[in-house]
Structures are given as structure tokens and as C-alpha cells.
Image (cartoon, rainbow, N blue to C red):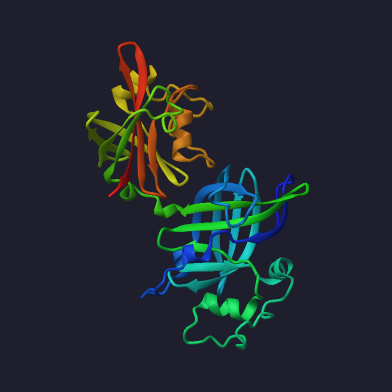
Amino acid sequence: MKNMKKRMILVGVVLAVILMGFASCENITEDVSISDIEGEYIGSFSASNLLKSAQSNDVNEGQGTAEVTVTGDGQIEVHCFGEEIDTTFMLSYYEQYDSLLVCLTGADFYNMYGHIPGAGHMSGGMMGHMGSEETEWIHHLNDEHQEGDEHFGGFDTQDGTFTYSFHMKEESNPYYLEFHGVKEDSLSFNDIGGTYIGSFSISNSFDSEHINDVFESGGTAEVTKTGDGQIEVHCYGEVIDTTFMLDYYEYNDSVMVCLTGDDFENMYGHMLGDGHMMGGMMGDMGNEETEWMHHMNDEHEAGDEHFGGFNMQDGTFTYSFQMKDESSLYYFKFHGVKQ
């Protein structure tokens, strides 16, 4: 391990997704290729005091990136970094149905498990002699692990995600920091166009719409591409029926949206490009900026509200409409799942 930020002490590395969540019940007809996992994964970190509950009891720890590179036969190098951590390490990978599961190698393996690879032989088989019914991962467990060794994840090649948890220690309190990201080339417009079926909710507070819902009604949003970086949304139901244009911007594992043209000026009281909060020029995108961050820096002012976007991981679209009834402001929120 190297380049760990000072406030964290890495005491081990453990995978954090339950094995059954990755492995399907039947083998796939085509082999999983290393080309399916090599690349850059954009996502976020979460923290938990329990390995198996890292996803359900998480505390958001900020955005993160994992760069995965092939270094040899059956091995990869992972550079995982963000505000909380910056570390590079080696892993071996093994096919398990429609997934590629990973394990530490060399000295990192010994430091984690307290024995050298090959010490397990839980099934009595010899190293390298793979049974006809064994996957690469099952053979690895039988040959190189002892009962109780922790292994719970890797790459899901169906949805293009990578999940990895770090066993951390802050003073005397151990916890797990989990990275979960989507492969960058999986984020495309083709994933957001279509029909979303869901519902509307209403609230008098923009930030607490989901919590203080006082009304709910069925709704639909039809999303259509109209040009480079733009979509048309027809959102309708019992409470509203409206069609409008939006610009869209990639932001880690999401696609964020913003009003455009006259709608932008009517909402924010200034024209596109008036913000320049970071002093940058329009179109001059920094190396560390996402498309959404660059849009915020170039085209918005402090205090501008933003009303929705697409979650690429669960295939959902959420958008809030600012409404006015006599002198009272309130919000309609649409939340739907792609069909």
C-alpha cells in the first residue's frame, strides 16, 4: 500500500459486497474478459462500522475514483482515491459466473489472512488442479484460503460496477470505508433516454420534499434527445402536464440536468455564463472537473437551486417543479424508474 492520507491508518483490505450479490445461479455462456473491468470507475465512498452492512448503514464520505489497470496474467493494479483516501494496490482476479471476484496477493495476502497462499486446501485438492465443477473463484477459495477468511465482492460485469472496502482504523475505532463506482464508459445518453414511470409528491420545502410529502399521485416522464447535450422531457399525470428542455451533464455516476435558454434566465435571473464562480472562462474545463462541476463554475451563481437528474445505478429520474398557489410557493417532485 502507498500514498495513504495521514488521518487514516489502513490496517487491511477487505471486499465488501456479499458474494451472493455478485454471483448468479447459472454460469454464463460467454467468458468474462479482463477488458470488461479495465478502466476508470467513478463513484463515491461510504463508511460503516460493520463490513457486511457497509452499504445499508453507510455514512457518505464523498466522491471517489478507481483506476483499474492490467499488470499481468490474472492480476490488476487499482489506484483508488478521493477526499478520504489515496492508495494503490495489487489484486488477483477470478471468474465467478457473470462476475470477476478479486483477492489480495503476495505480502498483502499474508498480512491480511496470516498465512501464505495455498495454505487452505479446504477440499483436499492440489494447487492448480481445478475440478470440472469448480469456477476459478471456488478453486481459489479451496486452494488458497482457510475457513473464516473474508471475501465478499469485486466487479459486477453486468452493470459495469466495482465495489471495494478498506478496513480502516481511526484512533482505537475500526471501521470500513467502501468505494462503489460505475465504469466511466458505461455512462452514456443511451442509459437515460426513455420512459420513466413513477409518482409525484408535494411539499412546501424544496430540501425536505421526500420527507414531508403530503400528497402523492401517479406520473410519467418521457425523455427524448433533441441535440448535443440536450433532452426534451414530457412529464405528466393527474397534477401536471408539461414539456420542457434541459441540458444534461455527467457527474460521477449520475447525469445532472439544468434548464436552458429563456427558462434558465427566468429561473435564475441571469444569462448562461454569468456565474464564473471559480474565475474560469466558458468552455475551459479543468482536469479535475466533471461536466456538472464545470457547468456550476461557469454558468451559476451562489444560491442557485438545482432541480434533478438521473441516477445511473438504479435507472431513476427525479425532477422538482417550483409551483406557486396565490402567494405560497411549493414543490412538485416527480420520481420514476425507467421501463
Q: Residue furthest right?
A: 172
Residue at horizontal 47 percent and vertical 84 percent from the top? 133
Quadrant in which residue 143 is drawn: bottom right
Residue 148 in the image: state x and y as whole percent: 65, 70
- Location of the N terminus (image quadrant): bottom right
Q: Position of residue 170 (x, y in %)?
A: 74, 47
Please indicate, yes or no, whether residue 336 appears anywhere in the rendered image. yes
Q: Vertically, is 286 above or below 204?
A: below
Q: In the image as oriented, which residue stretches furthest toward the top?
A: 327
Res. 284 in view: no
Nearest the viewer among 196 and 281 is 196
Q: How many marks?
A: 0
Residue sitting at 23 percent across and 34 percent down? 236
Task: Name the spot of residue 40 as percent of width and height, x first.
Answer: 50, 55
* Position of residue 154 measured from the top left corner of the image (x, y, whole percent): 53, 63
Is 284 in front, or is 164? 164
User: Which residue is located at x 54 percent, y 41 percent?
Assistant: 288
Residue 96 is left or right of residue 331, and the answer is right
Front one among 67 and 165: 165
